[in-house]
Amino acid sequence: MNAKASLLSAVPRSFAEVGLLTLVVTLFLVVNWPLLIDLKIHSFDDGTYSHAYLIPFISIYLLHRAFRRGVLTTRRFSTGIAVLAVLCSLASLILYIAQVALLVRWMLPICFFFSLLIFFRFSLELLLASVVLWFMVPIWGPLVVPLQNLSTYAVGIIMSMTNVPSFIEGNIVTIAVGQFEIAGGCSGLRYFITSCFVAVMFIYLNIRSYKKAVIFTLLCLAGALLTNWIRITVIILIGHFTEMQSPIIQDHNNLGWFIYVPYLALLMWFGRYLVDDKAVEAIASVELKTEPSKFGVLVPSVITFVVILVISPASYELTQSKTAPLDEIQGPAWVFRNIQYNQSWQGFNLDDEYGLLLTFGSPGFESQARSYLNQVPLSSTKIVEQYKLRETSIVKYLSKRNEKRVLMYQFVLGNQAVAAGIDYRISKIEQAFAGERNSQIALIDIPCNLDCDTAIARGFASLIFKS
């Protein structure tokens, strides 16, 4: 018996789990190709997420580490996990059809994690391989404004400690030789995301004490904020002493990394004092005591995974009809120049009045009436008065010919006009349960030099508007 056991122990570990893992990950990526396109546009092609290229390799490394440590083992079928996985995928599909970009992006790593849990036992590596995907997914946008305002406040305090007179109004810093705008790109979001990622990976690899983990995380985040504040202050001082002639003022993004990387090196040096090797070894030895791989009950797991594949963005897109490219819309440029239309349009031009009904519904989160790309009216428009009436936005403005006009527009879902904000989102989700994602902008532009109230009443009487 001992000789037989010795012989079996010498057999190389089976790669069946690796093959199953590769198949699950590949199929998950294939059926979520619409979301991968979104990632390409808003993560890999966006300078804010320039670190995104590294994240898939980190995720693969964590899965490989799970295999090497012996914790990548298959599990028996779990009804609870199966139900959670299906519900997660169904919720993601509904939100995808409703074009709620932020929530769909948030849920992508969660759906990935549950897809893995259908077949494999829980392990820290499996969890982290999914969690790190959040650092690649464009979900961090809501932090831009708070970080931007915090940077403005902090720079104001730092500048008050220098001998350079400065005045701050909003996000504009004015000095004697010019002005600096602390825009969204100056919020420090890049350093903040990078620091969060560094904290997660360093703690996983080296720290098991909650107290030490909190200390290291706070140092990471403090470094990210401080780096950005110093960067902005240095740029302002350089502008002052060079009278705005230094090339650093025009190309200032790299300056932050020259400050942040040395800080990161110093942080790694300090982090070695927080490492607890014995604790890491103890955790590793416990995790290695997993049950051997079992492929005995694959049928229910496969059925669950097939259901997940069916209720996916790719399956939904295969059921949608393809639309031909549209001709250019004819009409006043100041009305629709910034509208990104994807599906169809109807319009009329009569006695200097313009009407337009734009329909959206192509793949992607931007092809909808309430997309940030659809700017109505243009920001350059000279607005005289703006208000809402019966779910319709009414804008009285002056045209380029200094003619007074009224622009009326509303968002239409199904056969009803809806208000922007939460009402729009709720209606979109209700539509999504029926598999419908189309939305519309109904828009009328009318001259009203003499009587704007009559023009507005004429607009409401138009067949293009919904009640």
Image (spheres, helix red, strand yellow):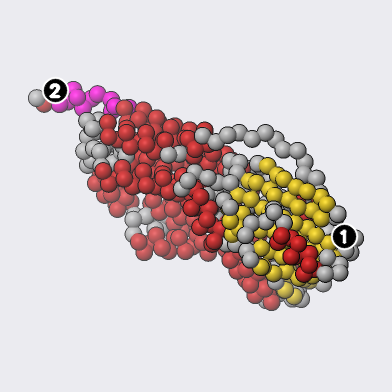
Q: Which mark is residue 408?
A: none
Pick whichever, 306 or 403, lies toward us.
403
The residue where tag 1 is placed is 400
Considering every residue shown, the one lying at the far left of the view is 1
The location of residue 351, given as percent across then percent down, is 86, 54
Residue 14, compared with residue 85, is above or below; it is above
The location of residue 298, given as percent across then percent down, is 27, 31
Specify the amino acid type for callout 1: Lys
**Can you see residue 228?**
no
Lateral position of residue 312 relative to residue 233, left or right = left
Circle nearer the viewer, 1 or 2? 1
Q: Which residues are magenta?
A: 3-15
The location of residue 399, given as percent across then percent down, is 85, 61
Query: For residue 327, which quarter of the picture?
Result: top right
* Residue depicted at 66% across the width and 63% down the height: 392
Name the secondary structure under disc 1.
loop
Q: Which mark is residue 4?
A: 2
Pick whichever, 450 or 324, lies toward us.
450
Pick whichever, 389 or 302, lies toward us.
389
